Image (spheres, helix red, strand yellow):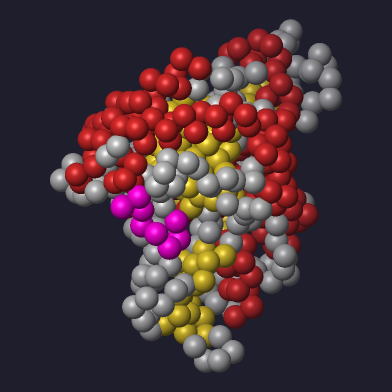
């Protein structure tokens, strides 16, 4: 796929023509509600066997050609490079597909083996109706090998809306996590109306993950976690109650999301995690944790090294820099996310790490007043607002995040930060760069069709049986 950024004066017809693709395929892939009203700076995902590469520091034409399995000359020609020895970081290159000319007597099975792919992948990529009928001289596009990852998605949707989300994108999920079972001070769990969505997840071969939390929109949870974690009896009771729900409803993974844990409770938290592992592993269940972002061991918060050692995997909550009550900024800036990932990698293996990815937008009033709450909505709605107010979308290359400003009907200034195809691709590229176990979305219920199209294009999604 190609990511195209709309320039001044461009129309969808012109863009479709330049890539030789039907207009309707672009409309559908990007769920464009206003196809006749494009915004300068808006990114579009274009269905194409070609792909896009953003030049990084240290890249050479040779290394890029090796990465994508194509000749250097084809990249030079495709991008009209006049000085291929000089590549500027941030430059967007179009990478042509791998092609194969069928030789006399060759079969699809032989071709698939040669390129390390499958017959079905070649058939699908080329629209072949009969895999036994290929002819010498035919040009086939060879799909590139995709890394396999696991994908989790949290949701706090109502049951019917959650089921709709599962039915729409469930083929791209490994785990599904309703948020959340709130722990009470007596060790019991606040009930959650999750049976309908759990059954829908299981029907889609998605592994349900039960999330325990001490955190709510009104409570930081420090005192609650202290009560539970400092008592051996209450630790045991919480695990017993979680196991009961898991057995009854079909959960196979326990996700422990205790936030704002006091420094004095760190070791008790580790003891709690070890208890969970000791109790759940004999039943074939897994244990995971959610970790607030840290960039060094000296920072306050839970102990990354212990969680990486004890839990089966961890989810890094690499979002909320652009907090709803704070000043406007990128919600998930890639430069800050990278610091967290690199610290995590220094104390735990990559195959235990999920990169957290938020898929919502925020709209702040300007000037920002301390404590004033930003409005939260989907990236689709962000585009709609940019269209409505005639905004020009900017792109922060350090944060790898789009944003724009506008003036509303009351004359008030706004600043909106959101996610688009470029920012999603940046996160996927980082996942591949560090060979992370997977990606965890916070949260379903915010439409972002570009994300799911790119996720499917970049990765093979693992399904697990526990």
Give the residue at the far bottom of this rendering. Answer: 411
Give the residue at the far left of this rendering. Answer: 298
Residue placed most toward the observer, 7 or 259 = 259
Q: Residue at x 57, y 65 (%)?
A: 377
Q: Position of residue 376 (x, y in %)?
A: 53, 66
Q: Main secondary structure of the magenta part?
A: loop
Describe residue 243's horizontal placement relative to residue 430 as left or right.
Answer: right
Residue 3 can be seen, yes or no: no
Q: Residue at x 72, y 65 (%)?
A: 33
| The N terminus: image quadrant | top right
Give the residue at the far top of this rendering. Answer: 105
Q: Position of residue 41 (x, y in %)?
A: 53, 66
In the image, residue 14 sits, relative to residue 195, either above or below, namely below
Point out the stretch of residues depicted in magenta: 216-224
Q: Position of residue 270 (x, y in %)?
A: 28, 32
Q: Residue at x 81, y 13 (%)?
A: 132
| The C terminus: image quadrant | top right
**Count of labels shown?**
0
Residue placed most toward the observer, 173 or 148 = 173
Residue placed most toward the observer, 293 or 414 = 293
Describe residue 417's horizontal placement relative to residue 398 as left or right.
Answer: right
Is residue 456 shown in magenta? no
Residue placed most toward the observer, 67 or 233 = 233
Q: Residue at x 62, y 53 (%)?
A: 157
Q: Position of residue 360 (x, y in %)?
A: 53, 59
In which image quadrant can residue 9 be found? bottom right
Residue 225 can be seen, yes or no: yes
């Amino acid at each position: 796929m190609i990511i195209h950024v709309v320039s001044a004066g461009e129309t969808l017809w012109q863009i479709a023509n330049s890539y030789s693709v039907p207009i309707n395929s672009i409309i559908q892939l990007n769920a464009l509600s206003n196809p006749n009203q494009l915004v300068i700076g808006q990114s579009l995902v274009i269905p194409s066997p070609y792909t896009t590469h953003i030049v990084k520091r240290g890249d050479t034409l040779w290394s890029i050609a090796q990465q994508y399995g194509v000749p250097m000359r084809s990249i030079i020609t495709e991008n009209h490079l006049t000085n291929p020895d000089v590549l500027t970081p941030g430059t967007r290159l179009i990478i042509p597909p791998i092609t194969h000319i069928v030789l006399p007597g060759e079969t699809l099975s032989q071709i698939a083996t040669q390129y390390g792919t499958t017959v079905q992948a070649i058939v699908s990529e080329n629209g072949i109706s009969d895999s036994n009928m290929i002819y010498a001289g035919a040009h086939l596009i060879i799909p590139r090998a995709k890394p396999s990852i696991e994908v989790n998605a949290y949701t706090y949707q109502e049951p019917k809306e959650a089921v709709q989300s599962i039915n729409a994108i469930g083929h791209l999920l490994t785990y599904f996590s309703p948020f959340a079972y709130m722990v009470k001070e007596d060790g019991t769990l606040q009930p959650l109306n999750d049976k309908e969505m759990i059954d829908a997840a299981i029907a889609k071969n998605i592994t349900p993950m039960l999330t325990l939390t001490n955190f709510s929109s009104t409570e930081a949870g420090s005192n609650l976690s202290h009560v539970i974690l400092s008592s051996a009896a209450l630790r045991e009771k919480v695990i017993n109650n979680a196991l009961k729900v898991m057995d009854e409803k079909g959960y196979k993974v326990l996700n422990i999301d205790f936030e704002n844990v006091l420094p004095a409770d760190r070791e008790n938290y580790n003891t709690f995690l070890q208890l969970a592992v000791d109790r759940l592993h004999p039943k074939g269940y897994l244990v995971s944790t959610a970790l607030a972002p840290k960039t060094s061991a000296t920072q306050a918060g839970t102990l990354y090294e212990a969680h990486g050692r004890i839990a089966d995997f961890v989810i890094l909550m690499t979002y909320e820099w652009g907090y709803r009550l704070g000043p406007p900024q990128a919600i998930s800036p890639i430069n800050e996310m990278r610091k967290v990932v690199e610290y995590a990698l220094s104390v735990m293996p990559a195959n235990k790490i999920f990169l957290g990815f938020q898929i919502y937008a925020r709209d702040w009033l300007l000037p920002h007043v301390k404590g004033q709450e930003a409005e939260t909505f989907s990236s689709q709605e962000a585009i709609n607002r940019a269209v409505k107010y005639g905004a020009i979308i900017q792109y922060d290359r350090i944060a790898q995040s789009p944003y724009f400003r506008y003036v509303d009907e009351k004359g008030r200034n706004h600043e909106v930060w959101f996610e688009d195809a470029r920012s999603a691709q940046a996160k996927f590229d980082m996942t591949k760069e560090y060979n992370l176990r997977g990606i965890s979305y916070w949260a379903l219920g915010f439409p972002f069709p570009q994300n799911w199209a790119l996720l499917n294009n970049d990765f093979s999604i693992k399904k697990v049986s526990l």
